[in-house]
Amino acid sequence: MSELEVVALPNGQLAENCYLVADRRTTEAVIIDPGEESAMFLAELDARAWSLSGIWLTHAHVDHIMGVGAVHSATGAPIHLHPFDRPIYDALPQFGAWLGLRLDPPPPPNVELRPGTPVRVGGFEFEVRFTPGHSPGSVSFAGHGMVFGGDVLFNGSIGRTDLPGGDLPTLLSSIHSQFLSLPDSTIVHSGHGPVTTIGVERLTNPFLTGSVAR
């Protein structure tokens, strides 16, 4: 069994995928995109006796950050966000209102994610890749045969671009340059839906094969 463990935690009314990623040797973990059900994430951490060392955000849309405040308060783990998504992040209460939710402003991020600057969990390092288009500051975390892409690329689809800061040509450019440059065997852990691989999406995703009119 690999010493790098990934736990997917689908949650919330928008079925967002939160991930715990841990180095089993050190019991150090990070959480990627803590969405609506923060109690679930914290209970999973506690059950596995993992220590949270970071909160990594692929982007700042409401369904991916609703749990940031609770997780940060409970663990003290630093919040990592690309600065281009800071305006969306700070507008959490307003976006929550769209869903009929009363949400408090999130705590300020602690670390600015920069492309080319690695992030680490235990002894494992991931590359930060800049993947805008779904949002202005969307990033993905690539390494160890996998990529955590948020809402960039899905099984059979791509992220929506009709939200503030979205842009379809930019998103497609991000996918081609930052995702399709990865090996076909790379596992894609998406922000919604089941896992897939780069190879499967390269061959069958209608947005990449040209079968969907753009």
Image (spheres, rainbow, N blue to C red):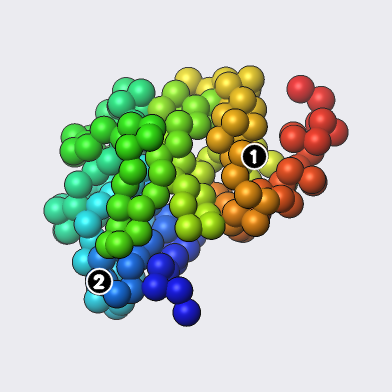
Using the image, tell me which numbered label, if any, was put on residue 180: 1
Taking the image as shown, residue 14 lies to the left or right of residue 127, namely: right
Q: Disc 2 to disc 1, how far (Cα)?
A: 32 Å
Q: Earlier in the sequence, mark 2 or mark 1?
A: 2
At which x and y percent is residue 200? Answer: 73, 52
Give the quadrant of residue 6: bottom left
- 158 to 76, vertically: above or below: above
Mark identifier at residue 206: none
Q: Is residue 26 visible?
A: yes
Determine crowd level at label 1: few under 14, some 14-19, many 20+ residues with C-alpha closer than 10 A: some
Q: Quick one: SS at disc 2? A: loop
Secondary structure beneath label 1: loop
Task: Tell me which residue sits at (28%, 41%) in the image.
Answer: 80
Residue at 60%, 44% (x, y): give it. 182
Residue 189 in view (yes/no): no
Could you tell me if the residues under marks 2 and 1 are in contact, i.e. CB atoms within 8 Å? no
Q: In terms of depth relative to the viewer, which is nearer, 51 or 96?
A: 51
User: What residue is drawn where x is 38% and y is 61%?
Assistant: 21
